Amino acid sequence: MDADALKEKIGIFGENSVMGGIIGLLLGLAAGYGVAGSLQLAVQAATALTLFPMVSKLFSQALSPISEAISDFMKKRFEGKEVFIGLDWPILAGRNELWVAVIITIPVLLILAIILPGNIVLPFAGIINLSFVVGALLLTNANLGRMIFHGIVSAPLFLYGATYFAQYITRLANETGAANVPDGKLLSWSTFEGPEIRYLFATGFSGNILSIILLIVWFALFYWMYTSKKKYNQSLEKG
């Protein structure tokens, strides 16, 4: 599945600004902001979704020469040894697959937030779910169809994780003064990284037997994935 071709088929709805404007308008109307307030929120959301990829790509352009310079420096000092340079995700911000997958999964995330039983989080600030898409880009070798599938399947995990931790995030925000959350309202992060492993750790260390079992299964699956990817990379080097 070609990202450029798919974005062209989606047309104007594949543009970050249009998707942001629609989301902002709908959320504003649903929250009772009125027409003026909803339009203002639509403009703010459209601006955020437009600028975010642009700023990310600037980071990508800035990090690339730094990475190359550090790599050359280390190779000269440690000749004959393999050196890995770790960089943050913006180095991948220029990939169209990343942004197409994010845009397509935004409506899915919103719909699931409304219909999932027990969920109390409506994502807005975290609507651009980079927590899934960066890992999916690497794990699927930029296979857009699999990336979108990954985003849809993992969406409930993010929402339920945000729901579980909402009370703790709210308490932390109030106690540290980072935010003043009124009584009866909760603050959360709808797309934080690894919601399932955080939940299993939190409940497992509280003595939940099922969480401990699932945590062991999670680490076993992670080890399987790690070894399979390692073998795959070695086969590429030999080939």
Image: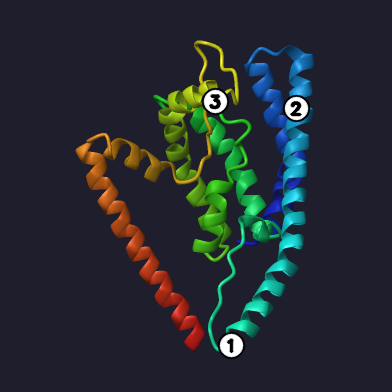
Amino acid type at image mark 3 = Thr
Q: Which percent across, then down, holds residue 220? A: 29, 59
Of pointers 1 and 3, the one earlier in the residue sequence? 1
Label 3 element class: helix
Residue 28 versus residue 66: which sits nearer the camera?
A: 66
Q: For numbered disc 1, what is the local secondary structure?
A: loop
* Comes first in the chain, label 1 or label 2: 2
Alpha carbons under labels 1 and 2: distance apart: 54 Å
Q: Nearer the viewer, residue 34 or 218?
A: 218
Quick check: 12 above or below 75?
above
Tell me the amino acid under the disc marked 2.
Ala
Q: Position of residue 77 (x, y in %)?
A: 62, 83
Q: Gap in Å between the C-alphas at discs 1 and 3?
A: 48 Å
Q: Check disc 2 and report the residue beneath it.
A: 42
Residue 50 placement: quadrant = top right
Q: Which residue is mark 1?
A: 79
Mark count:
3
